[in-house]
Image: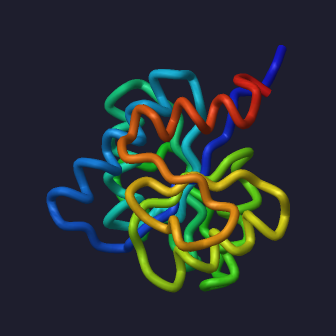
Amino acid sequence: MKRPLQISVVGAGSADSNLYKLAKEVGEQIALRGGVLVCGGLGGVMEAACRGASEAGGLTVGILPGPEAKEANPWVGVIIPTGIGHARNVLVAQSGDVVIALPGERGTMSEIAIALKTGRPVIGVRAWGDIEGVEVEVDAKNAVAKAFEFAGGER
C-alpha cells in the first residue's frame, strides 16, 4: 500500500477573510485528493487549511512550536507538541513531500527556504514568486493539482 501524499501548508499566523478562504480551499483540495495536510497547527492560514481539510474528511497534522497540545487549533487531527519554538519550522517543511506556501512573513519564508534547500517542491499561492525555485499558482485547486503532479500522486 502506498502512503498518501503529505503536503505541508505554510503561511501567516493571522489571516483576513480573503486569505482565510484561500487557505481553507487549499486544505479542502488536499483532502479531496486523499492527501495529508501538515502545518504548524496554530491560527490563521494553518487553522483555515486544517478546517478545510477536516471538513472535507481529510487528515490534518499540526506540529506545534510549544509544549502544550491545547495550543493547537480545533481542526488539527494529529497534534505534535514540540516545545522547540521556531525550530519546528524545519519539521513542518521536511514533513511535506511538497510545500504549499500562502502569504505570510518571516516564519513562512524560513519554511520555504528549508524546503527549497532540501529539494522539496514549493508552490506559492498568490505569493512568493520573487523567490527562485517557487512555482506560483493563482488559486487553491491549481496549486494542489500541481503539488500532486510534482510528487507523482500517491507516495
Q: Is residue 144 above or below residue 11?
A: above
- Which residue is painted at 74% across and 45% down in the image? 97
x then y, percent, for residue 36: 59, 36
Q: Is residue 143 above or below residue 86?
A: above
In this picture, residue 105 sits left or right of residue 121: left
Q: Is residue 34 above or below residue 120?
A: above
Looking at the picture, tell me which residue is in the foreground, 141 or 134. Answer: 134
In this picture, residue 126 sits left or right of residue 148: left
Q: Residue furthest left?
A: 17
Q: How many marks?
A: 0
Quarter of the figure with the C terminus: top right
Q: Quadrant of residue 17?
A: bottom left
Quarter of the figure with the N terminus: top right
The answer to whether residue 70 is seen in the rendering is no
In this picture, residue 126 sits left or right of residue 36: left
x then y, percent, for residue 91: 72, 66
In this picture, residue 15 sits left or right of residue 67: left
- Which residue is painted at 69% across and 62% down in the image? 133
- Which residue is painted at 43% across and 31% down in the image? 29
x then y, percent, for residue 92: 65, 63
Q: Quadrant of residue 153?
A: top right
Q: Residue furthest top?
A: 1
- Which residue is painted at 69% across and 74% down in the image? 113
Q: Is residue 107 above or below residue 112?
A: below
x then y, percent, for residue 154: 73, 23
The answer to whether residue 64 is seen in the rendering is yes
Looking at the picture, tell me which residue is in the foreground, 46 or 149. Answer: 149
Query: In the rendered view, how is the structure colored?
Result: rainbow
